Amino acid sequence: MSEHRRKPPQPQGGGRAAARRGQSGSSSGRRAAPRGATGSPSGSYGQDGEERPYGSRAEARRAAQRSGGGRRRAAEPGRGGRRAAPGGAGPGRGRAAASGKKRLIDYPRHDKDGWRRWMPSWKLVAGLCIGFFGAGVAAAGLAYAMVQVPDLAKTATAQNNVYYWADGSQMVATGGERNRQIVSLPQIPEAMRNAVISQENKTFYSDSGIDPKGIARAVFNMAKGGDTQGGSTITQQYVKNAMLNDQSQTISRKVKEIFVSIKVGAEEPKDTILEGYLNSAYYGRGAYGIQAAARAYFNVDAVDLNPGQCAFLAATLKGATYYDPAGATAIDPAATPEANRGRAQRQMQDTLDKMVEYGHLSQEERAKYPDLPEVKNPQSNSQLGGQIGYLVRLAKSSVVKNGVVTEQQLEKGGYSIYTTFDKKKVEDLEKAVQKVYKENIDPEKRPEKDTHVQFGGASVDPETGAIRAIYGGEDATKHFTNNADVTGAQVGSTFKPYVLAAAMKWGVRDPEGPPTQAQDERTVVSPRSLYSGENDFKVKEYDGTVWKNEKGEQWLQENDGELSVGEAPDYMIDLREAMRESVNSAYVQLGMDVGLDKVEEAAVDSGLLKDSLAGTSYPSFSLGISDPSAIRMAGSYATFADSGKQRDPFSVTKVTSKDGTIYTHKVETKQAFTAQVADNVTDVLKTVVEDGTGTNAQLLGREVAGKTGTTDGNKSAWFVGYTPQLSTAISMFRYPDDETIKNRTFLEMYGTGGQKQIHGASFPSIIWKDYMEDALKGTKPLKFPKPEPIGEVVNDAPPPSPSPSPSQSEEETSPSPSPSPSQSETTSPSPSPSDTCGVWDWNCDNGNNGGNDSAGNDSGGSETSPSPSPSSSPTGGEEDDSRGNQNGGLFAGPNG
């Protein structure tokens, strides 16, 4: 390069420019001093030997940070270089790098770009895990130290539950007495200890006291929002019993229970835990602890229990509601005495088998207990005598079934329960029943006929569904079963209104159509429709073919007194008269034409529980072989009373505790039937009381609708009726009250009360009338709504061939001669609604509603008419719901 060429000015200062100047300075004869020769710090030179204004790059960075300079200032103190000094705050370095401060947790990561900036490092993850684990261990240790081993004596305290009448006055305070007596382990039979261990926790003496699988199950249930129960060891169950003061179903309570179980398992001897469990467990019948249970079930001390009794008591620990042989239908209709005995027997035998398997019992000793031990009847608090016990039991079951509190929480007490019960109406109903009983039932005079006679009753407000009164039996401390609730007594012809409602809601099927038909392919039925009232009527399918059971047998339906109703030869009567005289043949055939599934649907829509209904496989379903409770029957008829508006019966309006109101009942209303359907059913049922089988139930100055019912074999009788303000059901039956009797059955009532036969028209309707007169005293008489015309008159022309008379052979195949035209016109008129009144038009105002004299007076169809003797009419009753002849067979219901 020519030295005459002009060079650009050199930058001042250090760096590479200084090095270059050092090189050019060689022309003056001077060399750059070697590193360190000038006495400068070694760090003041760069990699190439150039001199730096600071001793090191770190010093340069610190200088840059102090001066706040950017890249150029970090490079040199002068005008700055062209490149940022190493270590400067470049892209992606983050605030920490710019400030020079190191963060405790490097997240987001300062030295990464993009998504990597948000990906935690393995050091961070490991550190967090260790931190959380350490915190968990510390928390667990603190929780373990803070929880206390439960003191069993403190759990024996209890408070009263106070029950109130509908007007707010106190009914009774009960529950403060806890039925418990703690006994030491030597006073508990070894067989009882082994029974519980064999059935509940066979590894009790070797486990740690908690069940990890049970805990996992509880956590899983909590995650689903279900029950938090899950612990299955005896230790956990003991802790749960001892923590009865806190039975809330929450995660915190469950966690606390687990820690207490761990501490108890670690610090308490196993025998102490077992003793505590057996003394704190609930065995049913208000009995807490083995001593109270031994007294409640067997009236012996715990020390005297034998292995069979111990195995039975171990079964009750699984839930006395379903294992007490006395039953608990008030809490669950499925907990009948029969069902409970079966469950208890199976569980007891399984426990004994396990005791043998685990070496706790010899085979010879086990063989001594093949059956359930004899169990005494439950004893009730003396405060709960008369009807009070039934009322309290009904209210308690309502609170438990609605999930307000658990049965054990309720036993603990401290609740105020406000009921719907009207004190005066309860007293009026009890008085009406006792009057009939004292005047007519005499077990000493007629021991074979008047023993075991029982009544049940319930009264419901149609506007709300509130249960105003019940009659559960003679005395809740003597007769345990609540007769107002499920008893198993069939309802007979009080079921017929549901058949009529189904026929007016859905209609009968087209005989030429398919079995399943849409509603628009059906014919809605008018109450003036005509059906056969013939005795021994051959029941048909909807398409006209003769109905046969699975064995190919036909069904001949019998009427009350084995008499045909209507004018020969076809005996056609309208549905209103068939209801008035309770003619079986007409309604059993109507049910077949509508479809028994629709009849069932109508009954359920009205308020009956489906599980109380018999199967729909047989025509007799329409005639009342089902066994709903008196409460449900009263509530169901209340649906008709309020023009089709259905509300479930209820007994509790609200529940309060120290925490305030914890439950308030909300009335829910469904339109089960149109007002047109319901009001027409009511209008038909009015004629039953005005001029039919229910005349004994007439109330002076008031409109009444109702229906009588008597069942196969004369084993139960009913009257269910209503006014616009109140719906009431009364039942009567004979059933042994001794629960120790095996295979108890309903008994016939021929001759009971001095009558040849009991009908719904006799004692039940008399009780109903006496009660309703008092219950409605002082209230304004109201009228039912006037029904709008509904449906079409079906079967308005007589069939070409009437059904064979009872004297004709079942095997006859040739049809009988057709009736003459004059006969047809007389027996089956079909006036239109706009025409003048005819003999079948019960709604007309011309007063001609007496119907056919022959049918009304001479047929013997009324329940108030004298009935044949038992020998001549083995089935009896106007609702012989399952009677067949020797050719058709007998297909009886549960009581047949």
Image (spheres, rainbow, N blue to C red):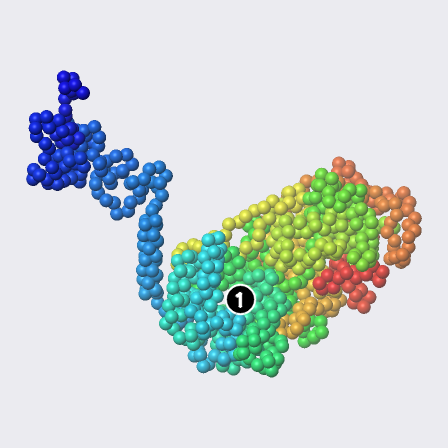
Is any part of residue 433 visible from this angle?
A: no
In-image side of 559 versus 663 (left or right): right
- Looking at the image, which is closer to me, 731 or 893? 893
Quadrant for the N terminus, please. top left
Q: Is residue 459 shown above or below 440?
A: above
Q: Which residue is mark 1?
A: 319
Q: Residue 44: where, in percent of width, then height?
A: 13, 38
Q: Residue 826: where, in percent of width, then height?
A: 85, 45
Q: Is residue 820 shown above or below 346?
A: above
- Looking at the image, which is closer to me, 520 or 275? 275
Classify mark 1: helix, strand or loop.
loop
In-image side of 760 versus 585 (left or right): left
In-image side of 743 versus 801 (left or right): left
Which residue is depicted at the point 59% across and 80% down? 363
Which residue is depicted at the point 42% across and 57% down? 250
Q: Residues within 10 Å of mark 1 (few under 14, many from 20)?
A: few
Quadrant for the C terminus, please. bottom right
In-image side of 8 versus 643 (left or right): left
Q: Residue 16: where, in percent of width, then height?
A: 17, 30
Which residue is depicted at the point 70% across and 75% down? 447
Q: Residue 856: where, in percent of width, then height?
A: 79, 53
What amino acid is found at the position of numbered circle 1 in the picture? Gly
Residue 845 found in image quarter = top right
How many numbered marks does the figure carry? 1
Is any part of residue 589 visible from this angle?
A: yes
